[in-house]
Image (tube, coloured by chain):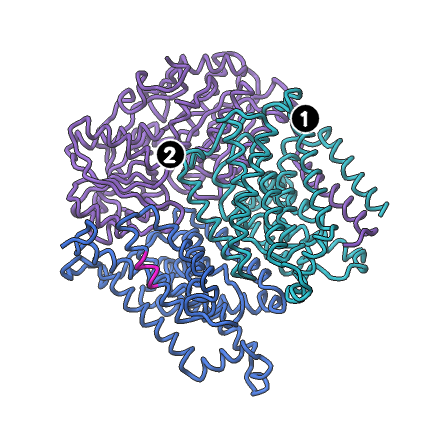
Chain colours: A blue, B cyan, C purple
Amino acid sequence: MEILGVPLQALLAQLFLGLANGCFYALLSLGLAIIFGLLNVINLSHGALYMLGAFVTWMGLQYLGLSYWVMLLVTPLLVGVFGVIVERTTLRRLYRLDHLYGMLLMIGLALALEGVFHSFYGVSGRSYAAPEVLAGATDIGFMVLPDYRAWVVAVSLSVCFATWFLIEKTRLGATLRAGTENPKMVEAFGVNVPLMVTLTYGFGAALAGFAGVLAAPMVQVSPLMGTNLIVVVFAVVVIGGLSSILGAILTGLGLGLIEGAVGIFYPQLSATVVFIIMAIVIMLRPVGLFGREK
Amino acid sequence: MNLTRLGYALAVAVLVIAPAFLYPVLVMKVLCYALFACAFNLLIGFSGLVSFGHATFFGGAAYFCGYALASLGLPTVLGILTGTAASALIGLFVGSLAIRRQGVYFSMITLALAQMLYYFYLQAPFTGGEDGLQSIPRGTLFGIVDLRDDVAMYYFVVAIFIAGFALIMRVVHSPFGQVLQAIKDNEPRAVSLGYDVGKYKLLAFVLSAALAGLAGATKSVVLGAATLTDVHWAMSGHVILMTLMGGMGTFAGPIFGAAIIVALENKLGDVGNLLADFTGVGWFRAIGVSVPLVTGLIFMTCVLAFRRGVLGELAHFLRLDRRQAKGADDV
Amino acid sequence: MQCNRSRFGTIVAAAFSSLSLLAASPALAQLSGDVVKIGFLTDISGVYSDNDGQGGVEAIKMAVKDFGEINGKKIEFLYADHLNKVDVASSKAREWFDREGLDMLVIGANSGAALALAKLAAERKKPMFAVTAATARLTNEECTPYNVAYAYDTVSVARGTASAIVEAGGKDWFFLSADYAFGASLEKDASEVIRAKGGRVLGSAKHPVGSTPNFSSLLLQAQASKAKILGLATSGDDLINAVKVANEFGINKSMTLAAILTHIPEINALGLKLTQGLYLTDGWYWDQDDRSRGWAKRYFDVMKKMPGAMQAADYSAVTTYLKAVKTAGTDDGDKVMAALKSTSISDMYTRSGTIRPDGRMVYDIYLRQVKKPEESKYPWDYYKTIKMIPGEEAFTKKSETKCSLWK
């Protein structure tokens, strides 16, 4: 059976792969949305943090012999701590100022991080192998799916859902959200808002680092791996609604699917499709598909 | 007033005699980027609009001017005007879409459109893609002056720069400029005063785009090529950095910023080697290798400590800006 | 904005400081005929930095040191990072020509820069060697009497790889190409040769450049085509990621990968497990003979990694130039170019090189295949050589040249 000249099987396969990519977008845009939504900071260093996560994972194996499974927990922790340090020492001073400065600071951070890794590892980067148990592939009827991709889909969806639940449905999340809307009030209730803000940034960074771990076996670990991704991820966040957690997740997944579909019929367009959509969305519904007026 | 005029006259004098002790091509390059940064500053410093895709005007004009000169064989001045006009038109298109939204959404639209244009330029045959548009002739000025002579070209570029810069100054000081400032300070108030805010912003945007285009077109003639680097989003980031480092909202600041960045790119390797030879510390050589690292650190330092930009900080340090109503912090 | 005293001070400060920044350069050497000055511009900190980069700088330093003096004249070497920006390359090269009395320019990486500088060098009547720039336009539409294209270009790698593989039995191809002029020309040149030799091109997929492409779906298309050879008409990061994804989806089990343009640092970054069986073409491999091994070891002592073809080409290009200067007895551009086009090149890089009237250096290149991990006996033992491709076959022929100098 064919749809528009493409066999149904191939179509399904491509869509599924698109979904797998979409999980990455979702995970990364989730971190961005959290940081923007709760901190009002446009974290342009997110791509570099993702790269940092991938490299830390590689370094863990290379220098300390730590396995992928260990790094799955260790890397986000390390990147999160790094984020906390960054927030504490630099970002914190810029909150009272316009968005622009925070953004510029993050650009500088990204450049510096990339420069450092580049001088040590060169631009071609390093290879990282998937753990043995996930290195195979399974025949699921309409395609042969690499196990690792299936794992990525499963774990990112879980993390996304867990994060969404944490922020939207728990008391901690409610406090977080309240803290950004009305910090003074929340402080009056005895909550240490600055600490909360710092930890939130750290959490966002940890998410980026986590995406890095997941990416390491799939994509070459190189200093520039985050640079091109970041522009797309930003577009995703804008489309979904800059501060909307759910928006980031769903748009990320959606974009993955759309790119997959476009990739079949007109691959040359797959790089620009996200920007076209973003421009349209901003024109019609500037707060984003799931956003709320701030 | 007189003192300012004297200051500018001195600066012009310095520019005029510069070829005697500086390499003209390098100064021309700085002037082009300086004009680009000044044009950008018109938007960000004086109108409060942050465009993330300004490179598309700079590089786009470079392409159109280059095409006009290399393939259509137009005379140089006409080619530059073509590039400028093209940028103005693209600016009209981008601006009219972006103006409809504010703040970060405005910025994101400019980025989105710039990215789409980037992919267009990547694919379009006339740009030469990765190879770039090459062999752009210097041509002659009105058929009289041969611009292949670097010094002659230099004075032509100085004239263009001064014209552009003067235009910006004129605009900022005009009633139109005052309204822009008012919009930047408090848009709702400007609206309540009855100003058609959208029209003002759009006009400022088109003006900025056109001047950025003038800079780009001139640059393509100076260096003889227009490439994808000129329309890449990294270039947009560069112009933001130049403006920030020099001092947003000052007139001369972006010029300084442009000089720093160009000097950085051209001379970092030399400086690194110099330091290495001088101190015997081999690691300094590595600085030359890592322009991104140094640029990133400078970026961060600027944002944290030099927000007014070097020029702004200088003025503040000398306590010369006491009379100014606002500092450059409030963008 | 008020007109006030502050402006005066700041404007003057700006003018002077800006200009002084530009003057901050190390002592300019005198323009003299007593020194042979060689300049090298390449990408030292960007995407091409592994293939050429600092390694290329060191290679040329070795060449200069090895040559010593020419008829009593010293040799000076200047180098800079062009950051992959034509602007930077252009202004730096101009400065070197006009203020430093540069005698010869070597350009590595970035075709745009190479094309721009070829024009410039021709205007200044100085020889220019394009080593890592792949565009074939340098010896066709944009050829100049002063340009030498060393190492490879898109035509030779495409034709060489394609013809050798088809002759070795790989007849059915599918292409994964970068969606811009470079990828398109690789695919086109390779496809022509494939068809001419009786092979078939069963399909092609283009991936967007400059973003993280979705290789998985494109590679599945490749697999569905049932072709036996996957031609990778792309380079750098995209190539590396394509190989990774091909492995992930097991495509390398049913198809053999042919990287039309790759360098040993990329193979090293991927590792043998992922690249085993990959076909590639190059003109030089560190382990090809004793001369190459000898030089490679010296390079390794400095850089701590084995040189790739580009660094070796840098060394050879400069050495060849210096030999020509010695032969000509002067560093005058025209005489040196005449000497260059009438000598043959036999050094640690190649035994069979000549420079044609269109500036193209022609030599025999080789089809190689990456070894399996168990076949590799020592570090950097990556390739086995499959076939030699004669230079006349791989490079553009006289009948099809677009260069007006070679008609």
- Chain of the residue under the numbered disc 2 shown in the image: C
Amino acid carrying label 2: it is Ala
Q: Which element is circle 2 on?
A: helix
Question: C400 left or right of C112?
Answer: left
Q: CA distance from mark 1 to mark 2?
A: 46 Å
What residue sits 61% from the left and 39% below the top? B215
Does the magenta portion include C196? Answer: no
Image quadrant in which you'd find residue A158 = bottom left
**Residue B230 at x, y = what percent?**
52, 41
Q: Nearer the viewer, residue B272 or A82?
A: A82
| Prevalent SS, magenta region | helix
Disc 2 target residue: C296
Disc 1 target residue: B151
What residue sits 63% from the left and 31% below the top? B25
The magenta-colored residue range is A253-258
Looking at the image, residue C385 lies above or below residue C243 = above
Question: A31 left or right of B156?
Answer: left
**Residue C157 at x, y = what percent?**
30, 31
Q: Nearer the viewer, residue C106 or B129?
A: B129
What residue sits 71% from the left and 39% below the top? C19
- Chain of the residue under the numbered disc 1 shown in the image: B
